[in-house]
Image: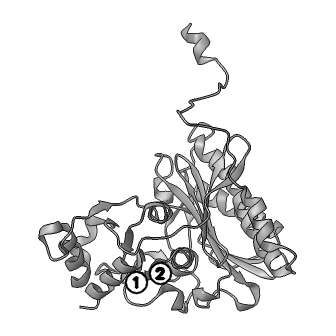
Amino acid sequence: MIEALLQRGPSDGLVLPGDREPTAPIVGAYLRDWAGEDPARVAVARVVAAVAEAAVPVAQRLARGELPGDPRRSVGVNSSGDGQKALDVATHGHFVRALTAAGVHAILSEEAEEVVAGAPDGTLAVAIDPIDGSGSIGIGAPLGTLFGIYPADGGFLVPGRAMLAAGYVSFGHSVDFGFSLGDGVVIATLDAADGTFRIVDAVVRLPREASEIAYNASLHRHWHPGARAYVDDCMAGKDGPRGRDFNMRWLAAAVGELHRILRRGGMFFYVGDRRRGYERGRLRLVYEANPIAFLCEQAGGAATDGTRPILDIAPEALHQHTPLVFGGAGEVETFGNYAAR
């Protein structure tokens, strides 16, 4: 009997009370309706759709873990000097091919030192982090993809407000796709039954106030006084100067933090500190902070480097680091007040 159970094929799976056949709108139809007959919009919609489609085989490979081989195998070093894993390099090539096929002219990726040439006649450029949080590959922790879409003629060394659209894929127990076309934020979930992303929230709004803060507590001794004072006052709870209790969270993956904050509110920060090489934080401005900031602002939230809006910063280098604070606008502003001390 045991052997028969172990050899049994797929079943209908677990059905919860209240479950029903999905009827939520499909992302492809949403993009088609948004684009209409406008060639510029059609080009943007094609790129967003290409990222969503390319995310499906990435999710499938992640779900197989080490069964086909080790996705954590070291294969090189990326633009920031971080070790590259097999999955980093494979997803980079995978997304480059998908974006080029979608007509993208130029691609800036965390996994390539220089800009990668795409379709010669393309009108758009894409900055992408193919696998965010890759230090957690193979342990079931959240991973993700971040991307921003720019006009091709402006290049990447421009303030983030030049972006036309941005989005992310969160690979967790569900595969979620969040994106903004410049008129709000939409979140969809992959329906494994048919391989389509279905919209679960078409009007994402970030609460102004936050009671759930994401940060790396181990860095407390390295922070500048303003960041330390902010955390200390939050930790004091309702008996401290903030007058209320806070929960603390840390996933060590910016996409996972972003997805949670967009779904339930909160704030994240990873600022510069006293360690050598971390004076400007650790996240990359063009393909990590800018897409996050675009999405947060479109959802009514905010994103800064502690003082300046992220989207107002003109990059000086393709892989430039930046401090990053994002989430509910009120809490981001409060953090900024502490940072200015």
Inspect this view and state whether residue 148 appears: no
Choose between 267 and 245: the one closer to the eye: 245
- Vertical position of residue 340 compared to residue 41: above or below: below
Name the N-terminal-most of marks 1 and 2: 1
Which label was assigned to residue 280?
Answer: 1
Q: Tag 1: residue type?
A: Arg
Q: Position of residue 43 (x, y in %)?
A: 81, 75
Taking the spot 70% from the left edge, 63% from the top edge, the residue there is 51
- Vertical position of residue 138 compared to residue 42: above or below: above
- Label 1: few (<14), some (14–19) or many (≥20) C-alpha neighbours in 10 Å: many
The image quarter containing residue 114 is bottom right
Inspect this view and state whether residue 245 appears: yes
Please identify the residue farthest to the left as the structure is shown.
239
Q: Position of residue 191 (x, y in %)?
A: 67, 46
Direction from residue 92 to residue 239 in the image, left or right: left
Choose between 89 and 65: the one closer to the eye: 65
Tell me the quarter of the image containing the C terminus. Answer: bottom left
Taking the spot 75% from the left edge, 85% from the top edge, the residue there is 152
- Vertical position of residue 165 compared to residue 156: above or below: above
Q: Position of residue 62 (x, y in %)?
A: 59, 47
Q: Secondary structure at mark 2?
A: strand
Real-space CA distance between mark 1 and mark 2, rounded to the nearest whole angstrom: 6 Å
Circle 2 is placed at which residue position? Answer: 321
Evaluate if marks 1 and 2 touch, with contact meaning CB atoms under 8 Å apart: yes
